[in-house]
């Protein structure tokens, strides 16, 4: 595999989980974002010192302090696919999926519409979700596994995300919320 392409929501979810994206360094391949996602990310929610949820400015410069995300611009061929995908997906997802599919990279998204479009259009794409990335990061390492309940709670509250009931990770996620 040549790497991962993150959509905006998955990038924010991972940032919420860890309080940064430094843990992306633990993966075997580099992470990328499309130019559309780079322009969409402006803030993330975080806890302040009193435990209140506050907005924190987030920029490409701030993200790069934690982990270098390679920003990818689509080729003309990828733009053609992106335009076709934009009928069903937002700009960041359409661009990210087009780039990932054409470059044999893994597209990281939690949007169920992406899987439907991939299936409907017969696009050859490998997809990863926030839960699968967290599980991949944790592996069999006891300390990392022990931090997953806290991360799931942070993503649920700060990222306002939980997998859809149809997700293969839904039960796992709900169990982590109860731990």
Image (cartoon, grey):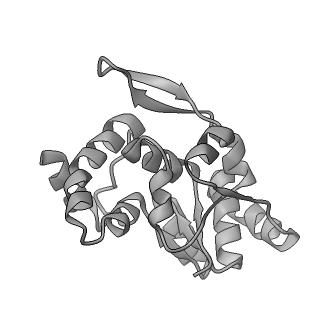
Q: Residue furthest left?
A: 179
Q: Is residue 1 visible?
A: yes
Report x, y in % for residue 178: 13, 46
Report x, y in % for residue 30: 59, 68
Report x, y in % for residue 148: 25, 54
Question: Quarter of the image holding residue 114?
Answer: bottom right
Question: Quarter of the image holding residue 87?
Answer: bottom right
Report x, y in % for residue 39: 72, 42
Vertical arrangement, residue 97 with respect to residue 67, above or below: below
Could you tell whether 47 is left or right of 178 in the image?
A: right
Which of the image's four quarters has the N terminus?
bottom right
Question: Quarter of the image holding residue 139?
Answer: bottom left
Residue at position x 12%, y 48% in the image: 179
In this view of the protein, which residue sits in the foreground, 140 or 120? 140
Looking at the image, how many numbered discs can be counted on the residues?
A: 0
Vertical arrangement, residue 64 with respect to residue 133, above or below: above
In this view of the protein, which residue sits in the foreground, 164 or 95? 95
Residue at position x 40%, y 64% in the image: 133
Q: Residue furthest right?
A: 76
Could you tell whether 13 is left or right of 40 in the image?
A: left
In this view of the protein, which residue sits in the foreground, 91 or 117? 91
Residue at position x 55%, y 73% in the image: 29
Could you tell whether 36 is left or right of 75 in the image?
A: left
Q: Is residue 110 visible?
A: no
Residue at position x 33%, y 49% in the image: 162
Could you tell whether 100 is left or right of 175 in the image?
A: right
């Amino acid at each position: 595999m040549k790497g991962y392409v993150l959509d905006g929501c998955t990038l924010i979810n991972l940032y919420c989980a860890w309080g940064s994206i430094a843990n992306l360094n633990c993966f075997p391949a580099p992470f990328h974002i499309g130019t559309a996602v780079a322009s969409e990310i402006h803030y993330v929610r975080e806890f302040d010192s009193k435990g209140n949820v506050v907005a924190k400015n987030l920029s490409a410069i701030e993200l790069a302090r934690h982990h270098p995300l390679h920003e990818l611009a689509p080729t003309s061929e990828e733009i053609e696919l992106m335009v076709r995908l934009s009928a069903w997906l937002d700009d960041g997802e359409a661009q990210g999926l087009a780039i990932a599919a054409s470059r044999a990279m893994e597209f990281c998204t939690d949007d169920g519409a992406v899987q439907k479009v991939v299936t409907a259009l017969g696009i050859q794409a490998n997809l990863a979700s926030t839960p699968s990335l967290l599980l991949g990061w944790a592996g069999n390492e006891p300390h990392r596994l022990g931090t997953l309940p806290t991360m799931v709670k942070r993503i649920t509250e700060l990222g306002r995300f939980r997998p859809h009931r149809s997700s293969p990770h839904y039960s796992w996620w709900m169990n982590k919320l109860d731990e």
